Structure formats: C-alpha cells, structure tokens
Amino acid sequence: MTHAPAYLFTGPEELLLHRAAQELIEELKAEGPVEVTDTRAPDVAEDGVPDLQTASLFGDRRVVLIREAEALPAEVSAQLVAQLEHPAEGTTLVLLASGTGRIMKLAKRIKDLDGRTDIAPPREWESQR
C-alpha cells in the first residue's frame, strides 16, 4: 500500500485526531519497523524543524508526528512546505491540528499530496418523538 509523504488530521477533538494518527502508524507498522518522533508545535519552534530528508539510522520507516500543528510559526511551516517539495522516501510527516488558519500553505501542500483528512466528531444522537 502506498502512503502519502505527509498527513494532516484536522478537527476540534484531540482524542479523535490522536486515534487517526495511531491508526495510520499501525498501518505503517504492518509494513515493517517504524521509528516515531512525537513532538508538539511549541517544541518544534524551540528546537527547529525536524529533518525529513534524513533516513532512519537503522533503515526503519520514520514518522514525525507534530501535535498542535496549528501553532507552528510561519517560518517553520514554510520550511516544512519546502521539505515536502521533494519528500524523502521512508519518512512520513503527520500533523494534528484543530484548524489550519496559520498553516494554510502547509495544509494546501499536504492536500495536494492526498494526505489531508478532516475529522468531525460524531453527531449527537437526536431522539425522535
């Protein structure tokens, strides 16, 4: 099964976003070993953009998971867009965001790569009388 080099899961419920990311990671693990780097957008802002071009030290597939991606600074978002212009084989970027206002260009690039999914919470059950 082929996977997009980047995924963006958006929606108001953090738990549902996390579940979607875990399902994707489990699919990738079914294909072989996966090295997961799990971080938050504020940490990326402090530590710098993760290098998506460098392969795993052990040859495993790499997954870089960034939570709260809507808080990525514009320069970090731009760097990720640039890295996704020529995505590295064996590396998957996964972003979890409550919205895309500040990361519109990144969201568009990921959508172009067929990796964007909007996750809505289930509708409340309405009783019929």
Image (cartoon, rainbow, N blue to C red):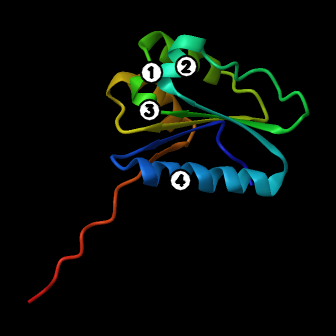
Label 3: which secondary element: loop
Mark toward the viewer: 3 or 4: 3
What is the quadrant of residue 94 in the picture?
Answer: top right
Q: Are marks 4 and 2 in contact (CB under 8 Å)?
A: no
What is the quadrant of residue 34 in the picture?
Answer: top right
The x, y position of residue 26, in whole percent, is 69, 55
Tell me which label, 4 or 1, sits earlier in the chain: 4
Mark toward the viewer: 1 or 2: 2
The x, y position of residue 22, in whole percent, is 60, 52
Q: For marks 3 and 4, give the CA distance.
A: 14 Å
Q: For marks 1 and 3, give the CA distance.
A: 8 Å
Q: Residue at x 72, y 49 (%)?
A: 2
Mark 2 neighbour class, 10 Å CA radius: few under 14, some 14 to 19, many 20 or more: some
Mark 3 = which residue?
A: 68
Kind of residue at badge 1: Leu
Mark 4 neighbour class, 10 Å CA radius: few under 14, some 14 to 19, many 20 or more: some
Mark 3 neighbour class, 10 Å CA radius: few under 14, some 14 to 19, many 20 or more: some
Tell me which label, 4 or 2, sits earlier in the chain: 4
Horizontal relation, residue 90 to residue 114: left or right: right
Tell me which label, 2 or 3, sits earlier in the chain: 2
Label 4: which secondary element: helix
Label 1: which secondary element: loop
Quadrant location of the N terminus?
bottom right
Label 2: which secondary element: helix
Mark 1 neighbour class, 10 Å CA radius: few under 14, some 14 to 19, many 20 or more: many
Q: Residue at x 84, y 50 (%)?
A: 32
Q: Are marks 1 and 2 in contact (CB under 8 Å)?
A: yes
Mark 1 = which residue?
A: 72
Tell me which label, 1 or 2, sits earlier in the chain: 2
Mark 4 = which residue?
A: 20
Q: Is residue 69 above or below residue 81?
A: below
